[in-house]
Image: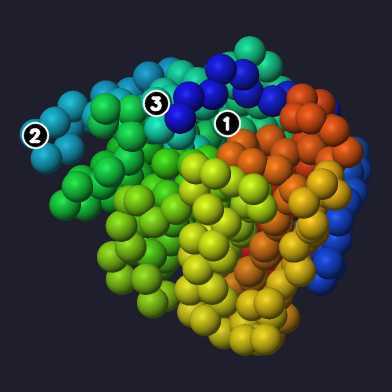
Amino acid sequence: MELTHLPSFLLSCPSLQLCGVQPEVTVQPPCNNNLTTILESRQTLSDRSPGCGKSPFSSGVRTITVNNRNRQFIIRVPQNYNPTRSYRLIFAFHWVGGTMNDVSSGGTDRELWSYYGMQRMASESAILVAPQGLNNGWANTNGEDIAFVDAMIRDIEGTLCVDQRQRFSLGFSYGGSMTFSLACSRAKDFKGVAVMGGGQLSGCSGGNDPIAYLGIHGISDGTLNIAGGRAMRDRFVRNNGCAAQNTNAPEPSMGSQTHIKTTFSGCRNGYPVTWIPFDGGHWPGAVDNGPESGARSWVPAEIWGFFTQAQLAS
């Protein structure tokens, strides 16, 4: 599947309050400065990457060698980067047929949808990475794409200052599948993931450890059926120790033009599970009460709020 238009949004800093069922997102003015102060007060020296204090490399395309193959990714370093401050690290994986440039540029909507909206939401508080898949996909044959992620982390954290407790991943479609694969095999290395319209296409090696998990899926998705999204979610409902009865989470009816958010109860501290089905198909920037334009998309704020919830719980 190819996306010829990526949605835009006009959102700032989300509320940190997440309730059990919440069909609308609350947006507040930017609050990253206060959040940064809280998080930095909790850090220890062992949480900081080896790159802290070093001269950084610039934003742009980087090429590394992984298993004798050249692999590329685009990295965006905050414009106000401080080598003594450790940053959140976010990987954003493209869909099938997409590219790292599509994700980093935001397509026709530019910075409004860059890194699936995370550039706008982060407001210079995170290091953002858009990897390039082989043949514009994430087959992860013999774990080669997981090895790519491992190598990117070593490359980035060897030079830049990263809070190693605060690595996150998100992706749409095939990129969501790759993010799910990371949740399975690298749960001890990542704090949380957001899977948008994903499936089990990139494998699930391991898959028994807890990780903060957000699933977003269209109830009418004809490319990767929502039943697969539910099964992926339920794996981490179990892993995270959440209440089993919550697997029957409510979903919007067809034609309702709404979304329903369920935050599962009973999960282990620091390992929340949130599920947001919406009335729609296979797209990343869902909106309520109308066709997809992105201007009113609740998705970026929900993802950023979920990552922040997981981060504050650590």
Quote the CA–CA distance across marks 1 and 2.
Answer: 28 Å
In this rendering, would 42 be left or right of 149?
A: right
Question: Dot 1: few (<14), some (14–19), or many (≥20) neighbours within 10 Å?
Answer: many
Question: Dot 3: few (<14), some (14–19), or many (≥20) neighbours within 10 Å?
Answer: few
**Counting residues from the N terminus, which is met first, the one under dot 3 or under dot 2?**
2
Which residue is pictured at 77% across the width and 25% down the height?
Answer: 293
In this rendering, would 139 be left or right of 119?
A: left
Quote the CA–CA distance across marks 3 and 2.
Answer: 24 Å
Q: Nearer the viewer, mark 3 or mark 2?
A: 3
Which residue is tagged 2?
68
The disc placed on residue 115 is 1
108 lies above or below 121: above
Which residue is pictured at 42% across the width and 75% down the height?
Answer: 209
Q: Closer to the camera, 292 or 264?
A: 292
Q: Which of marks 3 and 1 is in front?
A: 3
Which residue is pictured at 40% across the width and 32% down the height?
Answer: 96
- Work out whether residue 35 can be spotted: no
Which residue is tagged 3?
97
Question: Splitting the image into 4 quarters, where does residue 206 fall?
Answer: bottom left
Residue 290, given in percent of the width and then of the height, sits at 85, 33
In this rendering, would 62 be left or right of 115?
A: left
Type of the residue with mark 1: Tyr
Residue 18, given in percent of the width and then of the height, sits at 81, 63
